[in-house]
Every structure is written in structure tokens, then in C-alpha cells.
């Protein structure tokens, strides 16, 4: 009997191998499920999947699953069976198979969150740098002045998914120096570290650490100004956890990878003096970012373990807005609103496949909004003749997914 079962398994494996080779020749975008591998795991430990009987049948003897129902006399509902008849899986196993296939199809979409996170981490240091730009615009900086600045930027992100809402936390610490080269030009540099925890949906979460370095300049010509900065970010993703429900079993596949980003911004504006204590005016910005996430394989070797390919994304965001600056006796406060439009990629793409198969398939993540609004307020106040502090609060609006609050 065991010898016969062994021969059947060999023929099953041979058939699956030949089928996969045939599919590979067509080069298709194919999501292949390893049902044979899943069945082996169920047979090895049926109780873990919630099954109580692997040798009997739920349907009455001689009745095919296609003609069988739970209301039929002789139907055995006292246990959870592997098979409904002599050939077909029982209802519980059909549910497990459906959950299994669904997890495979969803996995590349979940992986696209990693690339989104790379671009989100760059916003932390930019928030602190924007506050420094604001300080420089508010006061005269003598030629030859060497300045130092630093700040913490944190944010909360909400994911609106069809199945469940997710969330994420952003944390960034930035330090920088700058030098007033002449009356019009200031040059500087900064370094920053990021620590994020993301939970985009109930079945996917990860931790992200980032290191950033940037150079920047501030140009002033009368009431007109121009800010520019160039950023590099290196990211490390750890504790990438993809959870799969298979009947009573809750399995967690884990992995880790890294990524990077190059980005640049140009921001210009003009200040109209309305009162000695009030200026206002337009501002324009163009931000370019190119991000990359390396492919990775999950650590386990089960029927659900997957591998994912490299990801690339290209963002180009143009902005137009208006600023309002108030110069009180001590505190300088400001407010601004910006309309932003994405001219680059509005979808993130990832490919993947089971580790037990050579086939891969790709899927697009949820389409990102092309238009949104950023609203920000802040204040700058001196602590001494040489030291001042700044604080700000920003909120995105008009996004159907991923609205953020930043400080």
C-alpha cells in the first residue's frame, strides 16, 4: 500500500514538473499555486489546519461530491473531513485552498508598500529642512555665518484598504550645518535617521530604518528666493511579516531586504510686503524622486513561502501654493497651502512567485492619487541671541488613501 502511494506521489510530482516547464516556455504572467505541496502539509499535520479526519468521507458511500449535500441522509457532519468523497476535497479543504490562493495573489500588492515607504521616509528630513529654510527667509544672515540646526519630525499615516484600515508611524531625526557664502547664497548639508513601523493591512507589517544625507542651498535676491536640495537615502526593511490564514492555522512568512532613493527639489517664491509685520506671496516647487527596493525571499520553505523581485518607482511632484508670514515682536509665525500633482508613477508594481516554482507574476498596487493638498502652519522663536527654535504641523487633504499628519 505504501509502495503504491509512493508511486502515485512520484507521478504527481512528475506531472507538476512537466506542467510547470510547459508554462515557462510561454513566458506568461502566471500565478501558480502549489496545491500538491499544501496537501502534503495538511496530511502531515491535519489537526493544525482544523481537520479531524483524513481517512473517511463526509458524503454517504457511493455518492459523488457533486451530488452530495449536508442535508442528505447519511451525510456525516460530526467531523471536519479531508475528503468529501473518494476523490474530491471536503468543504473545509476547499476553504483552505481558497485562502491559500488568495494569499498568493495578494502578496505582490502587499510588497509594493515597501517602495512607498522609501519615498515616505525622505519626507522626514525635508520637513525639518523646510523649517530651516523658513528661518533663513525670516531674518538677515551675516556673511560668513556658520549655522547649525536639528529637529525631530514625526508622522502618522492612515491606510484606507477595501478589507481593513492600516496605519503607520514615521520618526525622523535630522542635524545639519550651513554657511552664508555671500549676501545672496547660503550652502549647507545634513544627515538624518529614520525609524518607521508600518502596518498597511491586517496581514502585512514591517519595520523600516533609513539613513539620509543631503546638500542644499538658499538663494535670496531682494524679495525673491530659491531653495534647492539633493537627497540620498539608504533603507533597511526588517521583520517583514506576511500572515496567511489556512483554516485553523495562522502562518507568518518573514523576510528582510533593503532599498535606496535619490531625490531633488527646487522651490521658489516671492514675498510681497503688505505691512512691516506681514508678507505674503506665491511659491512653486518641483520634486523628483527615484526609489528602488531589492528583491528578497521569505525565510521559510513551505507551500506559502514566496520570493519577490526588484521594485523601481519614479515620482515627479509639481506644486503651486501661497504663503503668509507674520513677524510679531518675538515670534515669527507662518502658514501655507500647496496644491500638488503627481506627474510620475501613480501605481507601484511588484512581481513574485512561490519559492517552490520558477514561475512569477506581477501586480499593480492600488492607484495613488494624482492630486492633493498640503496645509502647514509653524512658528520660529528665539531662545537667545544665537539660538532659536521652530515648530510646525502639516496635514495632507484630498487623498483617498494614505493621509498623513506630520510635526
Image (cartoon, rainbow, N blue to C red):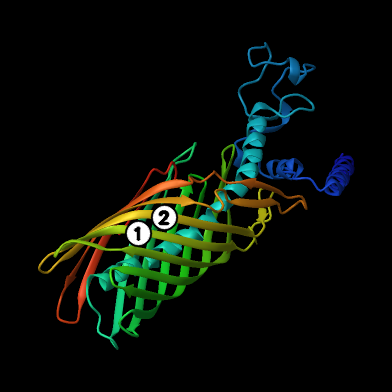
Side of 398 where 109 appears, left or right: right
Closest to the observer, 34 or 339: 339
Q: Residue at x 34, y 81 (%)?
A: 178
Q: Residue at x 25, y 80 (%)?
A: 141
Q: Give neighbour class at mark 1: few <14, some 14-19, many 20+ (Cα, 10 Å).
A: many
Q: Residue at x 85, y 48 (%)?
A: 17
Closest to the observer, 105 or 132: 132
From the image, tell me which residue sits under label 1: 283
The C terminus sits in image quarter: bottom left
Q: How many numbered dots are placed on residues in this image?
A: 2
Residue 121 in picture, x, y percent from top left: 44, 62
Closest to the observer, 287 or 35: 287
Closest to the observer, 228 or 243: 228
Q: Is residue 347 above or below residue 90?
A: below
From the image, tell me which residue sits under label 2: 319
Q: Residue at x 32, y 73 (%)?
A: 221
Q: Is residue 403 visible?
A: no
Which residue is farthest bottom?
A: 144
Disc ID at residue 73: none
Residue 101 in picture, x, y percent from top left: 66, 39
Q: Are marks 2 and 1 in contact (CB under 8 Å)?
A: yes
Amino acid at each position: 500500500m505504501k509502495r503504491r502511494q509512493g508511486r502515485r506521489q512520484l507521478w504527481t510530482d512528475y506531472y507538476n514538473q512537466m506542467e510547470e516547464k510547459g508554462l515557462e516556455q510561454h513566458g506568461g504572467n502566471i500565478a501558480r499555486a502549489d496545491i500538491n505541496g499544501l496537501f502534503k502539509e495538511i496530511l502531515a499535520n491535519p489537526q493544525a489546519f482544523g481537520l479531524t479526519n483524513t481517512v473517511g468521507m463526509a458524503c454517504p458511500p457511493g455518492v459523488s461530491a457533486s451530488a452530495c449535500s449536508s442535508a442528505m441522509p447519511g451525510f456525516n457532519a460530526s467531523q471536519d473531513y479531508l475528503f468529501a468523497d473518494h476523490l474530491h476535497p471536503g468543504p473545509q479543504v476547499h476553504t483552505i485552498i481558497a485562502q491559500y490562493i488568495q494569499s498568493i495573489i495578494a502578496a505582490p500588492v502587499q510588497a509594493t508598500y515597501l517602495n512607498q515607504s522609501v519615498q515616505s521616509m525622505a519626507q522626514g528630513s525635508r520637513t525639518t529642512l523646510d523649517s530651516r529654510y523658513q528661518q533663513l527667509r525670516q531674518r538677515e544672515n551675516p556673511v560668513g555665518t556658520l549655522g547649525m540646526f536639528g529637529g525631530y519630525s514625526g508622522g502618522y499615516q492612515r491606510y484606507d484598504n477595501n478589507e481593513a484600515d492600516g496605519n503607520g508611524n514615521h520618526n525622523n531625526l535630522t542635524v545639519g550645518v550651513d554657511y552664508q557664502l555671500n549676501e545672496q547664497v547660503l550652502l549647507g548639508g545634513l544627515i538624518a535617521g529614520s525609524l518607521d513601523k508600518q502596518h498597511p493591512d491586517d496581514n502585512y507589517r514591517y519595520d523600516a530604518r533609513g539613513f539620509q544625507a543631503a546638500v542644499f542651498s538658499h538663494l535670496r535676491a531682494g524679495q525673491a528666493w530659491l531653495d534647492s536640495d539633493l537627497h540620498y537615502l539608504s533603507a533597511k526593511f526588517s521583520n517583514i511579516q506576511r500572515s496567511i490564514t489556512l483554516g485553523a492555522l495562522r502562518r507568518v512568512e518573514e523576510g528582510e531586504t533593503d532599498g535606496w532613493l535619490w531625490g531633488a527639489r527646487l522651490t521658489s517664491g516671492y514675498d510681497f510686503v503688505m505691512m512691516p509685520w506681514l508678507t505674503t506671496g506665491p511659491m512653486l516647487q518641483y520634486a523628483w524622486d527615484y526609489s528602488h527596493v531589492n528583491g528578497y525571499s521569505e525565510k521559510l520553505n513551505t507551500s506559502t513561502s514566496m520570493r519577490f523581485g526588484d521594485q523601481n518607482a519614479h515620482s515627479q511632484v509639481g506644486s503651486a501654493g501661497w504663503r503668509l508670514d507674520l513677524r510679531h515682536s518675538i515670534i515669527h509665525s507662518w502658514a501655507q497651502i500647496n496644491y500638488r500633482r503627481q506627474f510620475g508613477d501613480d501605481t507601484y508594481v511588484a512581481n513574485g512567485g512561490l519559492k517552490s516554482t520558477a514561475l512569477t507574476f506581477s501586480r499593480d498596487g492600488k492607484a495613488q492619487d494624482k492630486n492633493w493638498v498640503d496645509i502647514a502652519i509653524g512658528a520660529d522663536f528665539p531662545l537667545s541671541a544665537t539660538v532659536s527654535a521652530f515648530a510646525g504641523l502639516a496635514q495632507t487633504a484630498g487623498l483617498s488613501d494614505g493621509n498623513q499628519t506630520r510635526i
